[in-house]
Image (tube, rainbow, N blue to C red):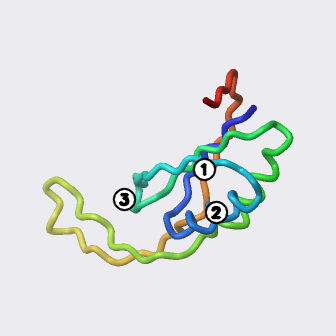
Amino acid sequence: MRLVIAVVQDKDSYRLSEKLVKHGFRATKLASTGGFLKAGNTTFLIGVEHDKVDDVLALIKESCHTREQTMTPMQPMGNNVDAFVPYPVSVQVGGATVFVIDVEQFAHF
């Protein structure tokens, strides 16, 4: 048994959830927040047999896409506030960060 932990952008979470259900995979969804952009994410916890891990990873890859987003950097703390000019920058967001962990024991009640 493996535990797949997938952190996906909120914009992709519905699509992934639908695909997982359609293909018979059970998942627990947790609301989470990204540290870099402070944007909403969804963390999926998916318990799956060893031979099905690649199937789950393929569904995640199909469902979660990267995109460009414009953001304004936060003002730095400290004495150099006068020299800081916040220009919008384009950053890549989305996609998925996935961890696959071996599960020693699993029980479903």
Q: Which residue is mark 1?
A: 6
Residue 61 percent coordinates (x, y):
72, 62
Q: Which of disc 3 and disc 1 is earlier in sequence?
A: 1
Whether the residues at callouts 2 and 1 have beta carbons within 8 Å, the answer is: yes
Give x and y (percent) for residue 91: 49, 70
Image location of residue 26, percent across then percent down: 66, 48
Residue underneath mark 2: 16
Residue sitting at x 86%, y 41%: 51
Three-letter amino acid code of the residue under disc 2: Leu
Label 1 to label 3: alpha-carbon separation? 17 Å
Marking on residue 38: 3
Figure check: 70 above or below 94? below
Mark nearer the viewer, 1 or 3: 1
Q: Is residue 6 left or right of residue 2?
A: left
- Residue 19, quarter of the rendered image: bottom right
**Of label 2 and label 1, which has the lower sequence position?**
1
- The local secondary structure at tag 3 comes to loop
- Residue toward you, 8 or 105: 105
Q: CA distance from mark 2 to mark 1?
A: 10 Å
Residue at image point 75% right, 53% down: 24
Percent across and percent down for residue 41 are 47, 58
Q: Which mark's residue is nearer the viewer, 2 or 1?
A: 2
Determine contact: label 3, label 2, CB under 8 Å: no
Callouts 1 and 3 close, C-beta under 8 Å: no
Which numbered disc flags the more N-terminal residue, 3 or 2?
Answer: 2
Between residues 19 and 96, which one lies in front from this camera angle? 19
Dot 1 crowding, Cα within 10 Å, few <14, some 14–19, many 20+: many
- Name which residue type carries label 1: Ala
Using the image as rendered, state which of residue 50 and residue 18 is in the foreground. 18
